């Protein structure tokens, strides 16, 4: 089982999780991060680091976030790898508590 980045990350893109990942399995898009499911070793170090609770183990994924399994797999094949922490997006605080942000995802 891999960990999955979910909708809460959209337009926030905190990278605290990236800094603790021992296998560098995070990939970065314009306003979202994803985890490559075949590279993730299920260590769980990233999950508690996310300030917006956007990372879940695949087997604990909320039912309304299931589509993000495929989104992580697909986008991690095309987006560049990220291995160091960066500043979150300027609008991160504004969007941290916003729900239903999938339509804002820039692929």
Image: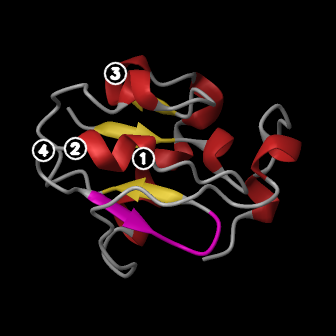
Q: How is the image coloured?
A: secondary structure
Q: Measure how far apart labels 2 and 4 are at the Cα level.
A: 4 Å
Residue 3 within the magenta-colored segment of the rendering: no
Q: Residues within 10 Å of mark 2 (few under 14, many from 20)?
A: some
Q: Position of residue 52 (x, y in %)?
A: 63, 31
Which is more foreground, mark 4 or mark 1?
A: 4
Q: Measure how far apart labels 4 and 1 are at the Cα level.
A: 21 Å
Which residues are drawn in magenta? Answer: 26-31
From this view, report whether residue 57 is shown above or below residue 92.
above
Mark 1 or 2 closer to N-term?
2
- The residue that label 4 is drawn on is 22
Answer with left or right where residue 89 lies relative to residue 72.
right
- Quadrant in which the N terminus is drawn: top left
Question: Mark 4 falls on what kind of element?
Answer: loop
Q: Measure how far apart labels 3 and 1 are at the Cα level.
A: 11 Å
Q: Measure how far apart labels 2 and 3 are at the Cα level.
A: 19 Å
* Disc marking residue 69: 1
- The residue that label 2 is drawn on is 21
Question: Mark 3 falls on what kind of element?
Answer: helix
Determine whether label 4 and label 3 are within 8 Å by CB. Answer: no
User: Along the line of sight, which residue is nearer the eye, 17 or 62?
Assistant: 17
State the residue at coordinates (73%, 57%).
11
Mark 3 or 1 closer to N-term?
3
Q: Position of residue 23 (x, y in %)?
A: 11, 51
Answer with left or right where residue 2 lies relative to residue 60.
left
Q: Residues within 10 Å of mark 3 (few under 14, many from 20)?
A: few
Determine whether label 2 and label 4 are within 8 Å by CB. Answer: yes
Determine whether label 3 and label 1 are within 8 Å by CB. Answer: no
* Disc marking residue 59: 3
Q: Measure how far apart labels 1 and 2 are at the Cα level.
A: 19 Å
Q: Position of residue 62 (x, y in %)?
A: 56, 22
């Amino acid at each position: 089982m891999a960990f999955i980045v979910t909708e809460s990350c959209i337009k926030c893109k905190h990278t605290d999780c990236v800094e603790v990942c021992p296998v560098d399995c995070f990939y970065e898009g314009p306003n979202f991060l994803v985890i490559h499911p075949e590279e993730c070793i299920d260590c769980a170090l990233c999950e508690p680091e996310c300030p917006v609770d956007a990372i879940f183990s695949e087997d604990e994924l909320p039912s309304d976030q299931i589509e993000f399994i495929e989104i992580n797999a697909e986008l991690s094949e095309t987006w560049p790898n990220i291995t160091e922490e960066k500043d979150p997006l300027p609008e991160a605080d504004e969007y941290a508590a916003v729900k239903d942000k999938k339509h804002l995802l820039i692929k």
